[in-house]
Image: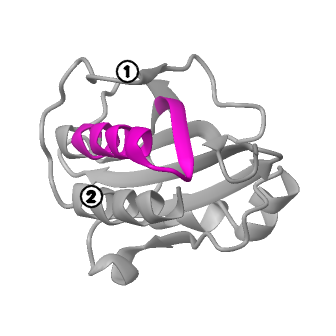
Amino acid sequence: MKRGLVLLMLLAVALSAVGCGAISNLAGGKSGTVADLWPDVPAFEGATKTDISLPLPLRLAIQGMVKASAQSNDAQLDKFDFAGYTTPKAPEDVTAFYTNEMMAAKGWNETDQPGCTGGAATGGLAGGICVFGQQNGDKGSALFIITAKDEKAGKTQIYYVRFDGIDKTKSQ
C-alpha cells in the first residue's frame, strides 16, 4: 500500500498545477462522495462543502492505484471516498492546519507518512498535499488532503480523498 501512496502523492502534487476537467465515473472499485467528512478527519474551519469533482489527473491516478492494488500481494483497496470543499484561505493555511500531531490524536497512526507539504515545497505551485495513514489490525486507511488555488474564483479547493482496504500481510 505504501508504494502506491507515494505514486498517488506525486500525481496529486502534479494535479495542483493542472486545471483539468472532471469525469463523472471511475471504472473499477467502489467510490463515491461523502456528505460530511469522516469522524476522524477534522474539518478546516470556514471551509464550505461544494459539489466539485475530482479532476481528471487525480481520478486516473486513483483508478490506476485501485487496479494495481488488486494485483498486489500486500494490500487490497476496497473503496475510496472523497469530498470537496472550498475556502477563501490560502492553500498554505490548509496544509498548516493539518499537523501530524493533530492527526495522530485523531487516530492517524502511520508514522512513516509525510504529513503536509505545500507552496515552495511543491515547486512553488499554488497548492499542497497532506498524506496520512492509519492501521487497525488488518484494516488500513490512507487520507490525502489536496489543495489547489482556483485563481478565477479566488478560492482554494480542498479535496479529501480516503482509501480503505486490507493489509493482507496482517490478515494471515
- The stretch in magenta equals 59-83
Q: Which of the image's four quarters has the C terminus?
A: top right
How far across and down, in percent of the image, does residue 124 sit?
Answer: 27, 79
Q: Secondary structure at mark 2?
A: loop
Give neighbour class at mark 2: few <14, some 14-19, many 20+ (Cα, 10 Å): many
Residue type at mark 2 is Ser
Q: Is residue 121 above or below residue 161?
A: below
How far across and down, in percent of the image, does residue 42 sit?
Answer: 72, 43
Q: Which residue is mark 2?
A: 16
How far across and down, in percent of the image, does residue 89 sit?
Answer: 47, 54
The residue at the far right in this view is 105
Give neighbour class at mark 1: few <14, some 14-19, many 20+ (Cα, 10 Å): few
Residue type at mark 1 is Asp
Q: Is residue 105 left or right of residue 88?
A: right
Residue 3 among magenta residues: no
Which sits in the foreground, 104 or 77?
77
Picture residue at 43% right of the left edge, 44% below the top: 69
Residue 79 among magenta residues: yes
Q: Which residue is mark 1?
A: 51
Q: Is residue 107 left or right of residue 12?
A: right
Q: Is residue 38 left or right of residue 34?
A: right
